[in-house]
Amino acid sequence: MAEQLELTDPIVTPPKVTSTYTVVVLTTDRETVSLPTTEPGLVLVTVKDNLGVRSTFTYTGAQAIDMIKWMNTANFSVNSMQKRVLQKLSSDGYLPGTVTGTPEPPPADF
């Protein structure tokens, strides 16, 4: 083992707890072929946690195409697209939890 310094008084830092995620990037591509499938279709969902750490989740092939079709035809007047994407990540076991909060309103000049 290499030399190391043993502190007389250890530095104690509070534990960091990740408790929430928000969608920051959503990429859809009907044509890209990405492993492990040989079929076209790619959806990338990047989320950021309450500590500022980003994580990206990938859907490929038929699963990605189905997700793109679902997003293209969904009625987002009741549940926002971000809420539905977070629910999808949760139901697929990527981020177990419950979606809370309200969608951001569109800008006044939109």
Image (cartoon, rainbow, N blue to C red):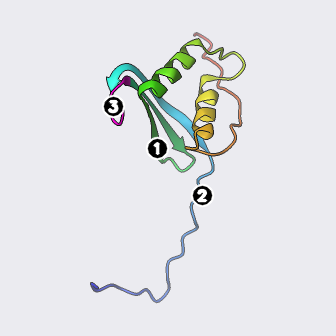
Residue 35 found in image quarter: top left
User: Mark 1 against mark 3, which lies toward the viewer?
Assistant: 3
- Answer few, some or many: residues within 10 Å of disc 1's Cα (few below 14, many 20 plus, some between 14 and 19): few
Give residue 62's position: percent from left, percent from top.
Answer: 45, 24
Which structural element holds mark 3? Answer: loop
Distance between the Cα atoms at labels 2 and 3? Answer: 33 Å
Determine which of the numbered discs, if any, sits on residue 55 in the image.
1
Q: Tag 3: residue type?
A: Ser
User: Mark 2 against mark 3, which lies toward the viewer?
Assistant: 3
Q: Tag 2: residue type?
A: Val
Residue 76 found in image quarter: top right
Q: Tag 1: residue type?
A: Ser
The residue carrying mark 2 is: 17
Q: Magenta part of the protein: which range? A: 34-40
Considering only vertical position in the picture, is 53 above or below 73?
below
Determine which of the numbered discs, if any, sits on residue 34 in the image.
3
Q: Main secondary structure of the magenta part?
A: loop
Dot placed on the residue nearer the N-terminal end, 2 or 3: 2
For the point 62% across and 17% down, which residue is it?
Answer: 106
Distance between the Cα atoms at labels 1 and 3? Answer: 18 Å
